Every structure is written in C-alpha cells, then in structure tokens.
Image (tube, rainbow, N blue to C red):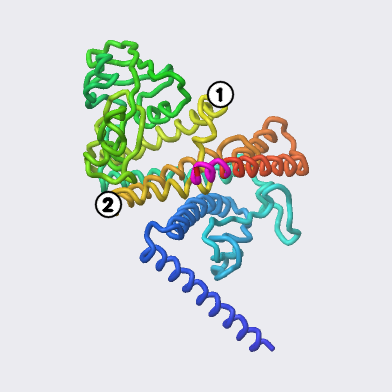
Amino acid sequence: MAKTKKQEEEKTTLGSVIELIGIIIGIIVILVFFPHSVIWNITVLLLMLSLLITVHEFGHFIAAKKFGVHVYEFAIGMGPKVIEFRRKNDPTKYTLRALPIGGYNQLAGEVMEDDDNLKPDQFMCNKPKLQRIIILIAGVCMNFILAIIFLFMLSCIWGSSEQASIVANVIPNTGAEEAGIVAGDRILKINGHGASNLDSLNVVNLLKNDKDSNEYLIKHKDGKKENIKVQLKTFVLSAETGEVLGELTEENTFDKIIEDNNVSKDNVVEQKLAGVQFDTKRKKGFVRSIKYAFTKFANTFTLMFRIIFYLISGNLGLDALSGPVGMYTVIDTATNVGSASYGLYNLIYLTAYISVNLGVMNILPFPAFDGGQLMFVFYEIITRKKGNTNVEAAINLIGFILIFALMILITYKDIFKLIG
C-alpha cells in the first residue's frame, strides 16, 4: 500500500514537471516567434505583473518568517498547482501554479487565530504591533527596492538624462519663443502647479485646461523669477525621440508632415506644446546611475500622490488611469516603437514605474490594501484594545467591492478608447 502511494506521488510529480516544462516552452515560443502580437503583449503583461506581485508577496513572506509567523503557503502564480515542495525543517509549502498572474502568501492569523494546531505566538495577529507593521509594509518596500534596482540598471546600460525641468532649447516660431523663454531657464510651475522636474511637468501638462495658453513661473539663469503667459500650438512629434517634426496648420497637415519626414504614422504623436525642449542626452556613470535611480524614484513616488490629489480635486479625469486593457495598450506602444533595444528600455522603465505605482497604491489607507490593514493596527495602538474582526472583514469586503467597481469602470473606458 505504501509503495502504491509512493508511485502515485512520483507520477503526480512527473506530470507536474511536464506541465511546467510545457508552460515554459509555450511562453518562450510566444516571446520569440510572435513578437508584438496580441498574445505576445498579453504574455509580457502577465509576466510583468507576476514579477511585481511575487516580489511584493516575497516581502511579506521574508518579514513574516523573520518574526516567526507561520506561513502555510508561498505561491508563485495562481490557479492549478504545478509543483509543490517543502524545505527541510520548514513547515511552509512552496508552490508554483499554472497561471502567471501573480502569487500570494497564506499567513497564519492575519486577522484572528485560525488553526488550533499552532502555538499562539505563531499567529500574526498576536505579534507585537511593530512587527505586524513591518510585515505589512515589507511588500511595499520590496516594490520600491525593485524599482530602484531597475532604474539603476537602465542608467548603467542606456544612460540617463537631466531630470530637472531646465529648458535646453526653444523651438522657433512657438509660444515660448514669442514669450521670451530662453535656454537655461528653469520651469518651476505651470498654471500654479509645481513642475520643477520632468515627471511632474508631464503630468501637469495632462491636467484639464480649457485655455490655449499656460501660465509659467520661470526662474532665469540670473536667479530672477518671472510669470510668463505662453500660447500653445499643436505639433507632430517622433514617438521614439520626442523630436518635433512639424507644426499642424491648415497648410501643413498631418499627412504632409509624416511624408516630408519619411516616417510612419504609427511612430508619431500629436501634442499641444508651448515650444520648450529639455536635455534628453543620456550620460552613463556609476555614481550618476545611483543618483538617477533615487532621484527618479523620489520624483515618481511623490508624483503618485499628486496624481491622486488631482483625481480627487477633479483636475485630472479617470481617463488618466489605466486598467488591464490600458496597460496592454501601453506595452504595445512602448515595445513596438523604434529599435528592439529601445523597446526593451521602455519595458524595463515601465516595470519600474508600475512597481512604484503598486507600492504607493498598497500603502494608501484604504480597505483591502496593506495601508488599510495598517490603519487597523494603528487603531489598536491608539485605543489599546483589539479590533472587531467582523467589522474589519466587512470593511475589507466593502473595499474590495469598490476597487472592483473602479476597475470595471476604468476597463470600460480603456476598451472604449481602444475601439474608438
């Protein structure tokens, strides 16, 4: 009987290995032989999200292990189990699952004691408040660390450009030139919104503006500050380099511009511009890469909170947010423009950007997020009593429903934009 059971286990393990090899081969075939197709974009998106979610969950996992919280399972992927193993003297079950759409931890006592076979100090809910806080923020920290590593890699391999919004060039016959802006001027604000770095400047340019002009707060090279009104004009730009190919007018049409510049319409974008350009030359260097990684991370981190504020205040519409369909479109655009090297650069940068985004979203004090769980811990610290687990469960359920409803709305808008 024991021999039969062992044979069954070996058969199951062999089948699981074959399934895993089949999945890996399938992914490789898609990535190599079907580049930039629909299935390729979906596969890349799933792999990217799986990496970010797995790294996030790994942060929770290592913190939980450090503080002696029992971890039932650490899974990479979702759906049917493909491979399962256990380490010696480790009660945790490690699994690889078939669908590359994330992963998860199953911790003992995330809300309440849930296993009579465990000791009380193995439950997360019984751990000291500081340890629970560290476990909850560990996932976010791992996302931030991953983003910094990726940004450092980008700068080391491809180089990095200036991050401050210092004007490098003014396009002739534009509103900026007419207003007197010159190279070396630094933009501090646009229409009252801070825009001292390129990331914040790009977001401010997306804010609702019914006017055909912008109010700039400029700091000249001599240190003098000045408010300047700049008229906006519509230009056609290279999607890869950002180079201005021509101004859209009744005579200088879109078709004429792409014909004169011998470019494909898929490789250009239309954009309203003031006429200022910034230094996009990339320079390499180890120290420079470190500085870029942390500066870019800090800019992106603070920008996420500004975007949330703009959404709440109504200055930015929901169209600025992307769900799965929108992310698919972004990946398609980012990897299908220019050379393969440029596409890889965009993909790594996008992964770093989404990693920061995922971290910031999870730290928000909203039910169902890590930040929401932190609020329950802070409640216990302030009131010095345990929270009501039923109330917490109800609040988290409401949070999940609201998030799900928001995702449906954003996905609907993404699909509408895609087919529109």
Q: Does the magenta-highlighted stretch encompass residue 371? A: no
Q: Residues within 10 Å of mark 1 (few under 14, many from 20)?
A: few
Residue kind at label 2, given as amino acid type: Ser
SS class, disc 1 = helix
Left or right of 77, for residue 345: left
Residue kind at label 1, given as amino acid type: Ser
Residue closest to the far front? 251
Task: Give the main secondary structure, helix, strand or loop, of the magenta stretch.
Answer: helix
**Residue 377 picture quarter:** top right
In the rendered image of this protein, does residue 407 appear above or below residue 30? above
> What's the magenta region?
412-419
Which residue is disc 1 drawn over? 313
**Residue 228 picture quarter:** top left
Of residue 226 and residue 271, the one placed in the foreground of this image is 271
Of residue 69 and residue 212, the one placed in the foreground of this image is 212
**Marks 2/1: CA distance?**
39 Å
**Percent position of residue 281, x then y:** 22, 37
Which residue is disc 2 drawn over? 339
SS class, disc 2 = loop
Left or right of 380, for residue 371: left
In the rendered image of this protein, does residue 36 appear above or below residue 408? below
Mark 2 touches mark 1? (CB < 8 Å) = no
| Among numbered discs 2 and 1, the one appearing first in the sequence | 1
**Percent position of residue 166, x then y:** 27, 25
Residue at 53% over, 27% down: 309
Q: How many marks?
A: 2
Q: Is residue 146 visible?
A: no
**Percent position of residue 159, x then y:** 25, 43
Residue at 50% over, 77% down: 18
